[in-house]
Amino acid sequence: MNTLTLPSYAIHLGDLRESAGDWLRGRNYSKIAILVDENTAQHCLPVLLEKTGLENFHLIKIAAGEQHKNIETCQLIWRQMLAFGLDRRSLLLNLGGGVIGDMGGFCAATFKRGMDFVQAPTTLLSQVDASVGGKLGIDFMQVKNSIGVFQDPAAVFIDADFLKTLPYRELRSGFAEMLKHALIADAGQWQNLIQLENLAVPDWLPFILHSLRIKQGIVETDPFERGIRKALNFGHTIGHAIEGHALESEHPLLHGEAIAVGMIAESYLSHRKLGLPMRDVEAITAYLNRIYGTFQIEKSNYPAYFALMQQDKKNENGQILFSLIHPIGNAVVNVACNNEEIEAALDYCRTSGR
Ligand SMILES: NC(=O)c1ccc[n+]([C@@H]2O[C@H](COP(=O)([O-])OP(=O)(O)OC[C@H]3O[C@@H](n4cnc5c(N)ncnc54)[C@H](O)[C@@H]3O)[C@@H](O)[C@H]2O)c1
Ligand SMILES: [Zn+2]
């Protein structure tokens, strides 16, 4: 059992038997509700109940998927919270991926001006990314995470056993954030990760812990994203554009799959703008291609990518700003790149085996 102690809460890593069970019994919550989606109800709830012995709780079950991360689903959740008679001394336990964590946390943080919630993330993405940083929220008017709050959970419980039922593509998607953490902050960990020839990892926990420490360090230095926290956007400026565009196509990409393409393009930009050696760009490209396979970028999509990048949250004064790396393990934020440079990066991606 490992515990990562943050200023206002702790992240407990390891078997839920040793963490969540005692923690829950030690608190005097008036009522406990568990929020699940249809998949985590099937795959994760039995594991949670068996490991924690939790018996008296209300279950709130919603449909799975990002398309349900909206105000209508929040209303459904709040309605059930009211119907169950939850009050400010109750607890909401969010059991699921980032959608459940973000939306459940938002519902709890706003219910009667705020009640406790805990996160039990069940995807690799939510374990390494969504469980630190206090960002909660929902999508609104087709804009991702446009309504939300910053609020810390009472605790986070990470049990890698949940990953056993996670579909491979979802696992791989979360792995991209883990690679990103290494690329922006820890060259040694990057070297360790690229030793993994595939994702049949017997024990994810040490990797998750390492990744969380990196994110925690960054978030603690800059909780409200005024400076260095932007480093976490490496791969995301071009990645989000590719993700957004693919969403409308017949072959939508998962977030991490798009970020993998984005990291290739932005490594190339790191070469152009900061002098990251080309051999590093090529090593990054080779590993990402190996894990994520080929995604065909079409030149005809460039205008759509540019239109999407123009809307990036980080932009200032109409300039597209990037978070890049140089050397590997060090991030440089607020690097303005012009259209010719971005196009060259997309061209590199298009011709580098993708
Ligand atoms: N708050 C943050 O800092 C932060 C950071 C990164 C991402 N996010 C948010 O997280 C969301 C993406 O998270 P996600 O990738 O976890 O998506 P998700 O919650 O939609 O989960 C992905 C899929 O896996 C299923 N699933 C989850 N756990 C499972 C398990 N153990 N076994 C089988 N199936 C399982 C889910 O039902 C879903 O179908 C996005 O909405 C994103 O905005 C938030
Ligand atoms: Zn991401």
Image (cartoon, grey):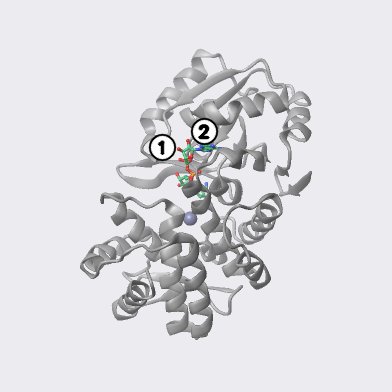
Asked whether mark 1 and ligand 1 are closer than 8 Å, the reply comes as yes
Query: Closest to the observer: 61 or 309?
Result: 61
Q: Earlier in the sequence, mark 2 or mark 1?
A: 1
Q: Residue 94, located in which quarter of the rendered image? A: top right
| Image point (57%, 69%), residue name | 183
The x and y percentages for residue 41 are: 53, 26
The residue positioned 43% from the left and 57% from the top of the image is: 257
Residue 348 higher or lower than 233, as above or below: below
Camera-nearest label, 2 or 1 = 1
Helix, strand or loop for disc 1:
loop
The quarter in which the C terminus is drawn is: bottom left
**Can see residue 45?**
yes
Q: Which mark is residue 281?
A: none
Which dot marks residue 65? 1
Mark 2 belongs to which amino acid?
A: Gly
- Checking the image for residue 104, the label placed there is 2
Instruction: Classify mark 2: residues with Cα within 10 Å, few (<14), some (14-19) or many (20+).
Output: many
Horizontal relation, residue 210 to residue 275: left or right: right
